[in-house]
Image (cartoon, rainbow, N blue to C red):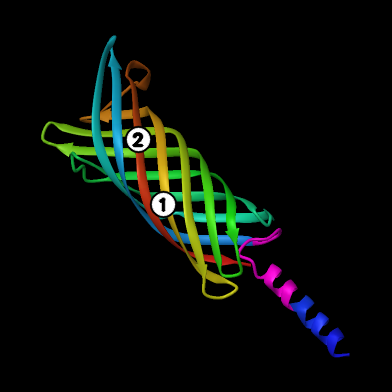
């Protein structure tokens, strides 16, 4: 009788451990956080056959919102939406950045209250870059692609709530789509320009799972 009770208790404990893992098939994840990054940038512009290239740097602060669904114990697939701000060395006053895409995530370690994760971000990005200087008032809109790689850990304080900490590589390639200079709209087909960024961001997110 005692052995039977011990077996039943062991089975319940093992089942609870499996169910309580950070990720499992059918687990729904949601998180909201903040990320701060530094980026190397390259701006290449071709006008009337003349190519000009400029290397610079930029800082970003974004607010990632993420949703994902566990397709297995070691894998989830989700979406991310990441609005924020972009500031280059010219200290332009108002620059809006937004990224959106899909996010496959792998759980290298998947325990009941701790996870080590590796993710990819595949999607699109958009940047509105404003300059307000004497004789140079412009608004440029860039849209293109995003490729991101990240790794991080998740600490769960309960079965539902935790904290994710991540280090991310973010790369974007965004051709110029619209340009207004001193009140005059330019045809983007006449100006071939592309802004490329490569950088690292640190992210902290409040995470939930159901």
- Specify whether 86 is left or right of 91: right
Using a 10 Å C-alpha cutoff, classify the residue at mark 2 as few (fewer than 14 neighbours), some (14 to 19) or many (20 or more): many
Spot the residue most to the top.
49
Query: Magenta span covers which residues?
Result: 13-27
- Specify whether 165 is left or right of 194: right
Please give the residue where the numbered disc 1 appears in the rendered image.
167
Does the segment drawn in magenta span residue 21?
yes
Spot the residue most to the bottom.
1
Quarter residue 41 falls in: top left
**Nearest the eye: 144 or 34:** 34
Q: What x and y, as percent, mark residue 158?
A: 56, 75
Quarter residue 142 falls in: top left
Question: What label does residue 197 carry, if any?
Answer: 2
**Nearest the eye: 52 or 170:** 170
Q: What x and y, as percent, mark residue 135?
A: 12, 31
Q: CA distance from mark 1 to mark 2?
A: 17 Å
N-term mark: 1 or 2: 1
Asked if residue 110 is positioned above or below residue 100 in the image, the reply reads: below
Quarter of the image with the N terminus is bottom right
State the residue at coordinates (35%, 41%): 199
Using a 10 Å C-alpha cutoff, classify the residue at mark 1 as few (fewer than 14 neighbours), some (14 to 19) or many (20 or more): some
**Nearest the eye: 136 or 45:** 45
Quarter residue 195 falls in: top left
Quarter of the image with the C terminus is bottom right
């Amino acid at each position: 009788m005692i052995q039977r009770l011990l077996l039943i208790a062991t089975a319940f404990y093992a089942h609870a451990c499996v169910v309580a893992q950070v990720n499992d098939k059918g687990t729904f994840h949601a998180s909201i956080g903040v990320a701060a990054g530094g980026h190397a940038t390259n701006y290449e512009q071709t006008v009337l056959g003349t190519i000009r290239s400029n290397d610079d740097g930029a800082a970003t602060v974004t607010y990632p919102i993420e949703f994902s669904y566990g397709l297995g114990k070691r894998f989830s697939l989700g979406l991310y939406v990441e609005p924020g701000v972009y500031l280059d060395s010219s200290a332009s006053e108002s620059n809006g950045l937004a990224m959106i895409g899909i996010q496959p995530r792998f759980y290298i370690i998947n325990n009941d209250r701790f996870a080590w994760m590796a993710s990819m971000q595949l999607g699109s990005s958009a940047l509105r870059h404003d300059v307000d200087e004497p004789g140079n008032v412009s608004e440029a809109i860039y849209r293109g692609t995003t490729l991101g790689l990240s790794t991080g850990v998740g600490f769960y304080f309960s079965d539902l709530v935790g904290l994710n900490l991540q280090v991310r590589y973010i790369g974007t390639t965004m051709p110029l789509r619209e340009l207004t200079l001193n009140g005059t709209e330019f045809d983007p087909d006449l100006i071939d320009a592309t802004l490329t960024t490569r950088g690292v961001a640190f992210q902290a997110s409040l995470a939930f799972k159901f």
